[in-house]
Image (cartoon, rainbow, N blue to C red):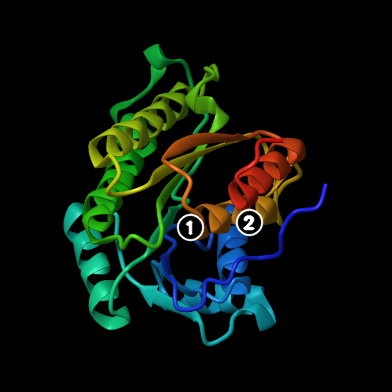
Amino acid sequence: MNVPTTPDLAGHRALIPGGTGAVGEGAVRAFLAAGAEVIVPTRTEERAQEFRSLLGETADEHLHLVVHDYTTFTGAQDLVEQVVHFRGGLDSVFAAIGGWWQGGTLAEIAESDWSGAFTELATTHMAVLRAALPHLSDAGAYTVVVGDSATWPVPRSGLVSMQQAALLMMQRVAAAESGESRRVFSLVLGPVTSRLAQGAVAAGDIGKVAVAIAAGRARSASIGLHDADEARAALAELQTGVRV
């Protein structure tokens, strides 16, 4: 199957919260390869420097690492306002914010488990979407990353399944509320192959799909990327408009 070449996103402003993670890294690399201006918030300057070193030559002048805490409504709003002010606007967001929790059954969880595995992560996603969505230009899209646990219960990791399901519904509600004015996507991932793990779909391919979403005009949707075949099919459809 022949897939079109990388889209030209020169001047496209992409905010990638969670960009220093394994999935986020794939998106950062893909957006940079397309020529976009890529803004990646990190918690510390040390983490920013580690990530720049990890990217190597990929970390060119189009990568903008910003030390910022965006986990609260106030923090996320400030981050987006800074991006809009200093970059002149915002075109796309790829939200790869996440983590994993495995503890006990729902009947065994502590309040601290609930706060960390559900409340804090869901709040961060909501804070970023709430701050960024009104500022997005017509040139891009908002994409949120969720795991397959959003639709499949994982015993003893129920808080993750619940939180991911909430994010999936967040995307659907945002898409319904936005209508034709904004494009809002979710990527539902199977096990991911990255520098940290071996899975069924590569982080780099996820990044290419994210770029194709940003560069295209496809309507809001939830896209399953459970393996390499699904990733190739999604990329081909997004770039050509033809289902394969």
Identify residue for label 2: 208
Q: Residue at x 52, y 71 (%)?
A: 9
Given residues 28 and 65, the one toward you in this image is 28
Q: Quadrant of residue 111?
A: top left
Ranked by sequence position, the earlier of labels 2 and 1 is: 2
Identify residue for label 1: 214
Residues packed near mark 2 inside 10 Å, few (<14), some (14 to 19) or many (20 plus): many
Residue 194 visible here:
yes
Type of residue at label 1? Ala
Image position of 56 with respect to 151: above or below: below
**Which structural element holds mark 1?**
helix
**Left or right of 179, for residue 109:** right
Type of residue at label 2? Lys
Residue 103 visible here:
no
**Left or right of 59, for residue 201:** right
Q: Furthest residue to the left?
A: 74
Mark in front: 2 vs 1: 1
